[in-house]
Amino acid sequence: MEPIEYENASEEVRALYDEIKAARGVPDVNNIWKYLAHHPATARDVWEGLKQVMGPGELAPEVKELIYVAVSIANRCEYCVNTHSTAALKKGATPGMLNEMLAIVGMASKTNALAVGYQVPLDK
């Protein structure tokens, strides 16, 4: 499957690209959008969901991005790890924060695997 570039996109997809570019202040959309564009309803759904959960809320923007990175690591999404690590740094996370989060993810993965392997029951 090839990415759908702006000039080859339907009007519906061009409108979505324009909205994303305006919201993010970028000259082009990320590659993920160019592939999601193969199913415009899914692309729109993802964009609406991202605006909702990554928009203003109780968590700071960089914390939201660090959480996104952690989940992306767990799901083995190299693209998402790269994209959201970059976004976290741009939104105020420091390299130290990113490294600390990676250490937590590594430790959680290790202890999760051990707990599953040992079949540790819940504490009372």
Image: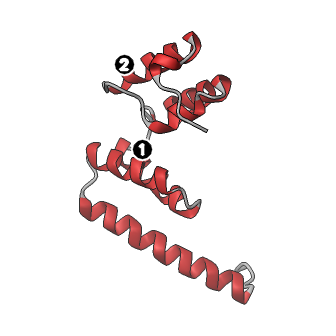
Q: Which residue is mark 2?
A: 22
12 or 58: nearer the eye?
Answer: 12
Please provide percent x and percent y for residue 37: 58, 27
Query: Image point 40% across, 73% down: which residue?
Result: 103
Query: Image point 56% across, 63% down: which residue?
Result: 74
Please provide percent x and percent y for residue 88: 34, 48
Quarter of the image with the C terminus is bottom right
Contact? badges 2 and 1 (CB < 8 Å): no
Q: Quadrant of residue 91?
A: top left
Label 2, secondary structure: give it: helix
Disc 2: CA contacts within 10 A as few (<14), some (14-19) or many (>=20): few
Query: Image point 53% across, 33% down: which residue?
Result: 3
Mark 2 or mark 1, whichever is nearer to me: 2
Can you tell which mark lies on residue 59? 1
Query: Image point 28% across, 52% down: which residue?
Result: 93
Please identify the residue farthest to the bottom as the structure is shown.
118
Quarter of the image with the N terminus is top right
Can you tell which mark lies on residue 92? none
Q: CA distance from mark 2 to mark 1?
A: 23 Å
Label 1, secondary structure: give it: loop
Q: Is 73 above or below relative to 39? A: below
Query: Which colour scheme appears in the figure?
Result: secondary structure
Please provide percent x and percent y for residue 112: 61, 77
